[in-house]
Structure formats: structure tokens, C-alpha cells
Image (spheres, rainbow, N blue to C red):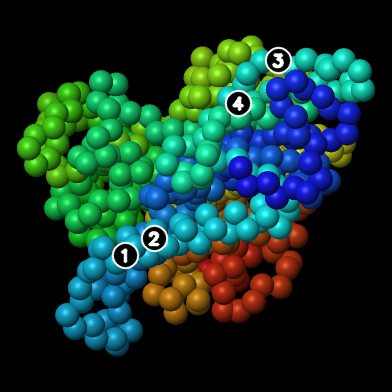
């Protein structure tokens, strides 16, 4: 344990087996949900511990969870590197820049990605020190339900066993038990494998293996055209792989606005990303040098896909392995997610759960918001998460981002709305960038003009969407956005123009 907390245990606690290891809050899991909850709790004056079991290559701690180690951060590092490579090979010439002898040093690209991950791991460890969060490197599991000690304290403590992550290099690292008045479960999620086809991370890859492939495969197969699948497919396509994506659903990006998804699909088709919809995957077998996938296409015809590597990206499962929820009777649903109410309270008093391990979108920023809100609730404040304004982003090129309702959702709910779109082809900055794919689309209430959804496919959609989130959080109308002065020339002018388009009065289109 690295104890950053000089104040030791709260007064009055007395537990026979756990002297001096009593906390106001114990967070299990150090991903974006957990580490942010721990920092916020500590900021609010709560004596806080965080337990995380993730190990780096040397067996030491690697705070940040899936997001930092095998998710958001490394995937964006590789997306950036592979985008540079593609630009240098295909687009620099348009700018009059000659690139001779363009080469790819994949080992260096992967090492850079690892370095970016490490900077983030170290950054979180620093933040724990700064905020006096006590960190335990190991697996946290419930021991039993709380017992109130006789005598001084009425506080009920949950006992949590910490089994040190092996190879952590800590001299004398031994199992220990700590206790907390409140426990925040933030144990995240794990990749879902195809039934009967476990990941070997050499040929059949989860997101973890997909970020560590040591040579550019000639042919890459991908099962699942979700957010993670598309991002991984984009990385390897840009680096030179022939990528085929098999998607079981008949619609592309079913969660996104249909018009935006269509636009994105057109762009991906043009780039050579082969996406097969309504694809039913059958047997997956490993050969000596690759993988063979039997599948049936939309017409019901039997097909075989032979690839060097196969990424399986068919969703993620809530992770409670090692948590020992049965010891305390913590309720899980049929998917294995910890059951929580709208405020992240579980079935047990003073036990909370946030992030991927509970219902809702598996997004790092959703986990963080829940973590902050729970810490504030524990401290007696009124933490709040607005689930309607959680943005979604897919970091492909073009990027795809949205917040709020899609057109198909509004139609299904019978909401009367007005729509306005503005294409990046008519935006000066996009032309200067040489990246005019896509559009911004506004959906506003027909009667009140309140912004109900904003959908973007195009350059820097991930950044542009923030304005829409702010607008929706403040319940702005499309006219509010249309009246705001946007810098010229900027991509954000497309946002303003799309807002103007709601009232059919674009100025530049
Ligand atoms: C390839 C990929 C790309 C992604 N890109 C994005 C993106 O761009 N934007 C975005 O918003 N989201 C993205 N995500 C999703 C994002 O990573 C998750 O939503 C986020 O990490 C969830 O945070 P969390 O804190 O709930 O869980 P996690 O990040 O999974 O962290 C849970 C932590 O708890 C630890 N743990 C589990 N059980 C125990 C235990 N019993 N004791 C101690 N420790 C335990 C785990 O080791 C882990 O460190 C991506 C995911 C993947 C796989």
C-alpha cells in the first residue's frame, strides 16, 4: 500500500482485524469512474482509499483502468499516429509537400503509444499523492456485511480484503483487510468473446491484443462494427491492412442518427473499409498462420473470410470477477451488472457503483461524472448526472459525435421537431484543412426551438460536440446558438450554420 493519508483512520472506529485501516470511502477500481471518485471524495475531506489490481509490464501498478491501459488513451494514440501516416502518404502532396521514401516503424509507433499510456498512469498516481488518496495495488473483494462495533462508534464498516497484485515488487506484499463506511464499486468491464472462441491475443484479438499487433497484418478481420471495432479497424486500415468488418445488425451504427450513419458509411466505403451488414458469423477456426471465419451474408449465402488476424469487438461485459459480491448479497442483473438506482446506489446501504459495471453507456466520461456525483452525495452534497447530455464520439476519420436524441428516436416518441443541416463542403476552415467530409445536424423542438439533439460527422467532431453539450445543458434554443458570434474561419461556424438551418436561413449555403 502507498499511504498518502497522514490522518489515518476516522475517530471512533474499532474493528478487531483491521486497526488503522479504516476509511470513510473505499473505491474498488482505479479506472476513470474509480480514480475520479476517489479524488473528488478526498477533495471533499473524506479519508479515501482506492484499490486497483491492474499491472503494467513490470508488474507494478498502472492506474487508469481499461481507459488508460487498453482503451481510450492507447487507441487515440494509435489513431493519431496512423492518421499522420495516412496523411503523409496520401494527402501531403495536395499541399505541395513531397514525401520521399515514406516508411513505417511500427515498433516505434507502439512504443510511443506505451509512453503515452505511462504518462497517464503516472499522472493519476501523482494526483492520488496530491489529493492524499491511499492507494492499494491489488484485488479488492468484499468480506462480509458491516458490523457496528461495540462502544464508541455507530458507523457500519464494510471489510474489504486486498489481495496484492502478484509481481508488484512490493517487499512483503501480503493480503490485508481494510474497512470503509462507504464503498464505491468501479470495477469496469471486460471484452466479450465469441461463444466457444476465447481470445488468444495472438490471432484472435480483443481490444487489448488489437493495440499490440507487432506487424501490419495483410488481412485483418473484425467482428462487430461498433465504436471500438471501427476505431481499431481504422488504425489497421490506415497502416495498410485490408480490413473486412462483419456486423450482425442490418443497420450501420444503429445508435447514431441514421443520416449521419449513412454519411459516415459512405466515407468508410470510399476509404476501402469493407463493412458487411447482416453478417451471421459461424465457426471461427485458427490455422497455422491465420484465422478462418465461416459466415453468411445478407442474402443468406455461405462465405469464408480468411485473415491474418481477427479482432472480436462484440461488446463488453460488466466485471465483478474477484469482487465477491455474494459475500455481502450485492444484487447483480442478468448481464452481471451491479444493480443501481438513478443515483448509483446499490442494493446495499452505503455501497455505490459507477461506470461500466452498471447500466448505461460504457463511456469513460459517463463513469467520471457518476464518480464525482457519488463522492458528492457521500459528502452530503447533491451530485447530479444529466444522462441526456452525455456525448458520444467515434474517433474515426471522419469523426462522428452526437448528443441528445436522434431523428429516429424523436419520430418514435412522436415529438414534433425541426431539423437543420450544414455540410463541411461549405465551411472555409474545412476547405483549408482539406477535410470537407460530413455535416453538422441540429434537431430542435418544433414549438419551443429547444435543442433536442446535435449530430456531427466530419473533422474534429469530438471537439465541436462540446458546444452542443453546453447548449443542451443550458436548454438553449437553436436560435441561441445561431445568434452567438463564432470565430472565422473555424469549423464551429458549421455548428452555427446548422443552427441557422433549423430556421432555413443559412448564410453560407
Ligand atoms: C479500445 C477501447 C477504446 C475506448 N475508447 C473510448 C473513448 O474514446 N471514449 C470513451 O469515453 N470511452 C472509451 N472506451 C470505454 C472506456 O474505456 C470505459 O467506458 C471506461 O474505461 C470505464 O471506466 P470504469 O472506471 O468504469 O472501468 P475501467 O476503466 O474498466 O476500470 C476498472 C478498473 O478496476 C480494476 N478492477 C476490477 N476489479 C477489481 C477488483 N476486484 N479489485 C481491484 N481492482 C479491480 C480493473 O483492473 C480496472 O483497472 C474505450 C474502451 C475500449 C476497450
Indicate the quadrant where residue 136 lies.
top right
Give the residue displayed 42% in from the left and 55% down from the top: 74
Label 2: which residue? 113
C-alpha separation, residue under disc 2 versus residue under disc 1: 6 Å
Q: CA distance from mark 3 to mark 4?
A: 12 Å
Question: Mark 4 highlights which residue?
Answer: 161
To which residue does mark 1 refer? 109
Left-right relation of 15 to 370: right
Camera sees residue 428: yes
Relative side of 313 to 476, left or right: left
In which quarter of the view is residue 323 placed? Answer: top right
Q: CA distance from mark 3 to mark 1?
A: 48 Å
Q: Is residue 259 visible?
A: no
Which marked residue is nearer to the observer: mark 3 or mark 1? 3
- Residue in the foreground of this view, choosing between 37 and 20: 20
Mark with earlier residue (3, 1):
1
Label 4 environment density (alpha carbons within 10 Å; few <14, some 14–19, many ≥20):
many
Q: Earlier in the sequence, mark 4 or mark 2?
A: 2
Question: Residue 145 — which label?
Answer: 3
Q: Report, in whole angstroms, how far the alpha carbon at label 4 lies from the one at label 2.
A: 34 Å
Relative depth, front residue between 224 and 372 = 372
Q: Residue at x 84, y 27 (%)?
A: 13
Q: Is residue 327 above or below residue 242?
A: above
Mark 2 nearby-residue class (10 Å; few <14, some 14–19, many ≥20): many
Disc on the earlier residue, 3 or 4:
3
Cβ–Cβ under 8 Å for marks 2 and 1: yes
* Tag 2 secondary structure: helix
Which callout, 4 or 1, points at the residue further toward the start of the chain?
1
Residue 391 coordinates in the image, percent (x, y): 59, 48
Amino acid at each position: 500500500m502507498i499511504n498518502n493519508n497522514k490522518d489515518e483512520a476516522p475517530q471512533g472506529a474499532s474493528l478487531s482485524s483491521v486497526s488503522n485501516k479504516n476509511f470513510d470511502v473505499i473505491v474498488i477500481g482505479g479506472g476513470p469512474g474509480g480514480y475520479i471518485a476517489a479524488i473528488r471524495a478526498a477533495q471533499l475531506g473524506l479519508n479515501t482509499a482506492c484499490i486497483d489490481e491492474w499491472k503494467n509490464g513490470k508488474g507494478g501498478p498502472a492506474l487508469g483502468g481499461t481507459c488508460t491501459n487498453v482503451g481510450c488513451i492507447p487507441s487515440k494514440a494509435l489513431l493519431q499516429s496512423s492518421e499522420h501516416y495516412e496523411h503523409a502518404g496520401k494527402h501531403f502532396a495536395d499541399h505541395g509537400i513531397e514525401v520521399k521514401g515514406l516508411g513505417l516503424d511500427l515498433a516505434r509507433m507502439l512504443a510511443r503509444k506505451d509512453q503515452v499510456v505511462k504518462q497517464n498512469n503516472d499522472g493519476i498516481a501523482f494526483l492520488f499523492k496530491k489529493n492524499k488518496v491511499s492507494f492499494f495495488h491489488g484485488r479488492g473483494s468484499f468480506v462480509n456485511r458491516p458490523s457496528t462495533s461495540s462502544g464508541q462508534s455507530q458507523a457500519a464498516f464494510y471489510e474489504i480484503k486486498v489481495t496484492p497484485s502478484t509481481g508488484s515488487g512490493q517487499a512483503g506484499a501480503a493480503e490485508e483487510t481494510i474497512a470503509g463506511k462507504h464503498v464505491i464499486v468501479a470495477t469496469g468491464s471486460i471484452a466479450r468473446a465469441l461463444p466457444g472462441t476465447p481470445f488468444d491475443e495472438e490471432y484472435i484479438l480483443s481490444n487489448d491484443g488489437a493495440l499490440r499487433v507487432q506487424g501490419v497484418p495483410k488481412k485483418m478481420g473484425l467482428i462487430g462494427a461498433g465504436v471500438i471495432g471501427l476505431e481499431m479497424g481504422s488504425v489497421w486500415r490506415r497502416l495498410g491492412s485490408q480490413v473486412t468488418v462483419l456486423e450482425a445488425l442490418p443497420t450501420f451504427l444503429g445508435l447514431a442518427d441514421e443520416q449521419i450513419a449513412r454519411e459516415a458509411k459512405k466515407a468508410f466505403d470510399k476509404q476501402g473499409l469493407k463493412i458487411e451488414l447482416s453478417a451471421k458469423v459461424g465457426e471461427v477456426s485458427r490455422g497455422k498462420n491465420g484465422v478462418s471465419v465461416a459466415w453468411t451474408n445478407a442474402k443468406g449465402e455461405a462465405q469464408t473470410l480468411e485473415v491474418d488476424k481477427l479482432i472480436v469487438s462484440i461488446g463488453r461485459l460488466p466485471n465483478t470477477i474477484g469482487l465477491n459480491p455474494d459475500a455481502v448479497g450485492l444484487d447483480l442483473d442478468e448481464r452481471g451488472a451491479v444493480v443501481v438506482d438513478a443515483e448509483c446506489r446499490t442494493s446495499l446501504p452505503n455501497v455505490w457503483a459507477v461506470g461500466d459495471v452498471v447500466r448505461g453507456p460504457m463511456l469513460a466520461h459517463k463513469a467520471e461524472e457518476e464518480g464525482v456525483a457519488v463522492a458528492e452525495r457521500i459528502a452530503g452534497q447533491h451530485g447530479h448526472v444529466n444522462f441526456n447530455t452525455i456525448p458520444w464520439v467515434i474517433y474515426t476519420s471522419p469523426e462522428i459525435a452526437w448528443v441528445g436524441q436522434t431523428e429516429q428516436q424523436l419520430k418514435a416518441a412522436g415529438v414534433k421537431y425541426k431539423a437543420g443541416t450544414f455540410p463541411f463542403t461549405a465551411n472555409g476552415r474545412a476547405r483549408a484543412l482539406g477535410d470537407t467530409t460530413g455535416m453538422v445536424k441540429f434537431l430542435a423542438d418544433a414549438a419551443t426551438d429547444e435543442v433536442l439533439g446535435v449530430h456531427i460527422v466530419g473533422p474534429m467532431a469530438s471537439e465541436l460536440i462540446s458546444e452542443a453539450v453546453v447548449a443542451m445543458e443550458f436548454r438553449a434554443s437553436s436560435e441561441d446558438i445561431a445568434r452567438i458570434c463564432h470565430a472565422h474561419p473555424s469549423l464551429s461556424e458549421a455548428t452555427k450554420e446548422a443552427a441557422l438551418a433549423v430556421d432555413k436561413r443559412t448564410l453560407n449555403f
